[in-house]
Amino acid sequence: MMGHPDTFFDALEIRDPAARSADHIRRVKATITAALALPAWRAHLGPVNPAEIDSPAALAQLPVLRKSALPALQKAMRPFGGLMPGQPGHWKRLMMSPGPIFEPEANEIDPWHVARAMYAAGIRAGDIIQNTFSYHLTPGAWCFDGGARQIGCAVIPAGPGNTDAQLDLIEAYQPSVYTGTPDYLKIILEAADDKGRDVSSLRRALVSGAAFPPSLQAWIAARGIDAYQCYATAECGVIAYETSAREGLVLDEDLLVEIVRPGTGIPVEPGEVGEIVVTVLDPAKPLVRLAVGDLSAFLPGPSPCGRTNGRIKGWMGRADQTAKVKGMFVRPEQVATLLASLPQASRARLVITRANEQDQLLLRLESGSGGHTLVEPARSTARSILKLDTAIEIVEPGHLPRDGIVIEDRRGAV
């Protein structure tokens, strides 16, 4: 029943980019309108007129909501921090991710919009899927289970671990597709080799939840399994997914993605690495400018596979670069505040080193002519904001790397 990956889930994937942008703005307005009906969102967003959010630039003026802030918000107003409509009984499933972050699942077949990623990986109705994501408490397995149901696949709710049972299931049911982390797929395949078990029915995989480096991609491909990856979070569902082009990950149609400078809500220049910020276009479960804490960058142009939505490079590390220095936490948001107070500087990078058994801070600032006049104001401002003594270095514009790193901790370097 295996399908070819070079076909499209629906016409939305190949629509004119201008039509997509117009549709996204319409849905952004509806989502913000729904959010403003909830007290926590009203307090967070402040005075905003949804009708005025008529472009990505207008959306970028709204404050970001950091995923790292959700546990405290939810503890103050249980269970969802006042960010979700209705009572807990309104939802289909009530789950919990590490943090803890309490996650509701909507009453739809595929509320995490995973089917589109599965279809791009060549998964079709009639396929049997061995789903090794955890069905216990967290949303992961249910996300992929819903996507499989949307397409019309049978699902083996295997969960993770118990590799011998996994091999029993594969031999009995002959699943054609694996879903789970890429690392665990390798474990299953190696165990099958060691025990002489037949897992040849597995021909495709959709993996997530862990890095999928080229070396592991090649290892799995050599086993005859066509594996694709998708990038997802429990709050947003699938954000982007791999296609047959194998050039980055195509953005999902049901959300709007920005890449911002870590610690801020300010979009980066095209192609520059920054933090992923997601607005889920769903008034029934509004999520406006959630900073998910991961780094990526946009790729230029459309995907060679024919899909016309934007693309990201994939997961490129964590944006939450919080470090502890001399007993004090230093955060990207503080560096952003510091930079905003120095209008002559265009970019900042805080470097942490260690010498003579002492932590050392160096604030590197990009500035044009006259940058030397920044040294004393920057030192004083850094002391006020960071509560730590900081050395200052002024560099030419364009000198600092565009890699999304705001706080560079070199203390572990040899």
Image: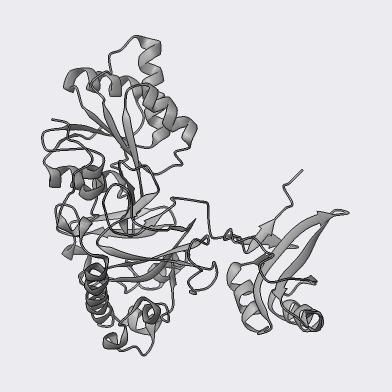
Number of marks in the rendered image: 0
Instruction: Using the rendered view, name the quadrant where residue 121 is placed.
Output: top left
Side (left or right) of 339 relative to 362: left
The x and y percentages for residue 31 are 25, 75
Residue at point 37% right, 50% down?
249
Render colour scheme: one colour
Q: Quadrant of the N terminus?
A: top left
Q: Name the residue at 34% across, 84% down.
A: 42
Q: Is residue 66 left or right of residue 127?
A: right
Between 119 and 199, the one lying in front of the other is 119
Quarter the C terminus occupies: top right
- Specify the farthest residue to the right: 356
Image quadrant of residue 390?
bottom right
Q: Quadrant of residue 285?
A: bottom left
* Nearest to the observer: residue 8 or residue 342: 8
Q: Residue at x 32, y 74 (%)?
A: 82
Against 14, is 3 above or below?
Answer: above
**Is residue 257 positioned above or below 179 on the image?**
below
Left or right of residue 58, residue 252 in this image: left
Task: Give the percent coordinates (x, y) of residue 168.
Answer: 25, 18
Using the image, determine if residue 83 lies above or below residue 159.
below
For the question of whether residue 285 can be seen, the reply is no
Q: Residue 176, position in %: x, y?
A: 21, 27
Q: Nearer the viewer, residue 185 or 158?
A: 185
Q: Residue at x 72, y 53 (%)?
A: 410
Residue 97 appears anywhere in the view: yes
